[in-house]
Amino acid sequence: MPAAPTYVLRYFPIIGRGEPARILLAAAGVEWAEEHPDWPQAKADQPFGHLPVLIEKTEGRPDLVVSESGAIERFLARTYGLVPADPRQAVVQEQLRDLLADATNAFFEHVVADKEGAGAALQQKKRDEYEALLDMAIAHQTALLRQNGDTGRMFGAELSYADIAAYAFFKSQLTFCASLRPDLPARLRPRLTPEIARLVAAVEADPKIASYMSASESLAALL
């Protein structure tokens, strides 16, 4: 029987766009390590010139090198059964991840507009776009959690890709993004519903994920 694959995740030593992949690797229970390449010196060595990059190493086979955070996450989620095998069911979860990516991109666009001193109208427009996507994501997640019995899971009884993506998103908002916009935690916390708080607790209660995170990294403590 061939040996199980091992993984290397290349990313910066921050939460950011690499955190969903880290949690997926932890949830999968596989052997993995993280590399922090010297940047920007290592930029030219990456497939698309940016991070994260995932490398799957399997004995007897060439390494699989995957770039783009969404592609990495979907590959891991599908490989380790964190999305349904039925593509019609899987896409319902995967679209939620893309909504969160849109909200993340909108956040950085509004921060850049503020930092670069764009006109007041453009700054407000970018901030409003971010706020609207954030509210949409919270509303959709809360509705799914309620439909699923308010168990802390969005789909079924088991941990899913959608749960992990949501958890990583709010963790990034309240830590890394908050370092760029200090008022963000005070504005975000009151909008997080009790259902989302239960999702956070349920994700952190998973034994494999709990072993990955230290107590200081708990998102539940920030809510």
Image (cartoon, rainbow, N blue to C red):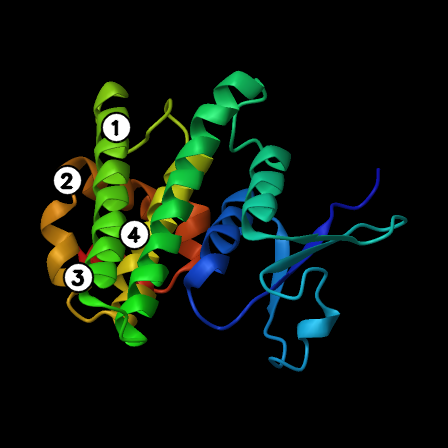
Q: According to the image, label 4 marks what residue?
A: 170
Rounded to the nearest angstrom, the CA distance separating label 3 from label 4 is 10 Å
Q: Position of residue 197 (x, y in %)?
A: 20, 43
Q: Nearer the viewer, residue 143 or 104?
A: 104
Rounded to the nearest angstrom, the CA distance separating label 2 from label 4 is 12 Å
In the rendered structure, which disc, 3 or 2, sits on the residue that comes first in sequence? 3
Q: Specify the label residue 153 is tagged with.
A: none
Which residue is found at the position 12% from the left and 57% from the top? 187
Task: Classify mark 2: helix, strand or loop.
Answer: loop
Q: According to the image, label 3 marks what residue?
A: 185
Rounded to the nearest angstrom, the CA distance separating label 3 from label 2 is 14 Å
In the rendered structure, which disc, 3 or 4, sits on the residue that comes first in sequence? 4
Task: Classify mark 3: helix, strand or loop.
Answer: helix
Q: Are marks 3 and 4 in contact (CB under 8 Å)?
A: no
- Badge 2, how many Cα within 10 Å: few under 14, some, many 20+? some
Rounded to the nearest angstrom, the CA distance separating label 2 from label 1 is 10 Å
Q: Are marks 2 and 1 in contact (CB under 8 Å)?
A: yes
Q: According to the image, label 2 marks what residue?
A: 193
In the rendered structure, which disc, 2 or 4, sits on the residue that comes first in sequence? 4
Q: Specify the label residue 145 is tagged with.
A: 1
In the rendered structure, which disc, 2 or 1, sits on the residue that comes first in sequence? 1
Task: Classify mark 1: helix, strand or loop.
Answer: helix
Examine the rendering and report whether any part of residue 129 can be seen: yes
Examine the rendering and report whether any part of residue 206 can be seen: no
Q: Amino acid at mark 3?
A: Pro
